[in-house]
Amino acid sequence: MFDTLEVVTTVVVGLMVGVEFSVAFIMNRILDALPEDSGQLGHAHGGRMLGALMPFWYMGSLVLSAIWAVAGWHRHGAGLVVTAAGLLIVSVVMSILLLVPINNRNKTWTPDNRPDDWKQQLHRWGRYHYVRVAVIIAAFTLLVVALT
């Protein structure tokens, strides 16, 4: 059963990393290359879609990691799992304090109501997102290493 927990947690966190990496390095670049209105509308739609899903994925990843840390407290790699869970906490706090407020504004924008600084706000979100991606990659790496 413990082995299943380790694998499920690692896969769930790994898939989250893949989605967020794709957003940072593929989707945002595609959307930014579209004509202004199309790109902005795409960002807003993505914000609504992923904004509804990702809180559950982040919290689920954190809960699974915490369960692994507690259940495997006396096993090899426990410190790595605790550190990974700590990094996932950092990613959730970053999301709530830095990224979600921008996303909540962005997902309501249309070409008719977007603020003059909408591009700057999206670029700021992107910079914060790069840091968050680095944090969750580090957490994922620690979980993978803890498996060995």
Image (cartoon, rainbow, N blue to C red):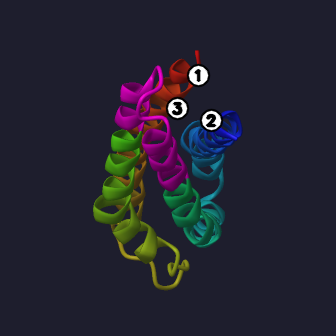
Query: Which of labels 3 and 2 is toward the front?
Result: 2
Q: Are marks 2 and 1 in contact (CB under 8 Å)?
A: yes
Query: Which of labels 1 and 3 is toward the front?
Result: 1
Q: What residue lies at 63% left-to-right and 52% top-to-bottom?
A: 31
Quadrant of res 119: bottom left
For label 1, count other residues whose C-alpha is less than 10 Å away and answer few (under 14), some (14-19) or many (20+).
some
Q: CA distance from mark 1 to mark 3?
A: 11 Å
The one of 30 and 11 positioned closer to us in this rendering: 11
Which circle's residue, 3 or 2, is located before the other in the chain? 2
The label on residue 65 is: none
The one of 40 and 63 positioned closer to us in this rendering: 63
The residue wearing badge 3 is 140
> SS class of the residue under badge 2?
helix
Residue 28, percent from left and from top:
58, 48
Amino acid type at circle 3 is Phe
Q: What residue lies at 44% left-to-right and 68% top-to-bottom?
A: 103
Q: Which residues are magenta?
A: 61-84
The residue wearing badge 2 is 6
Residue 129, percent from left and from top:
42, 47
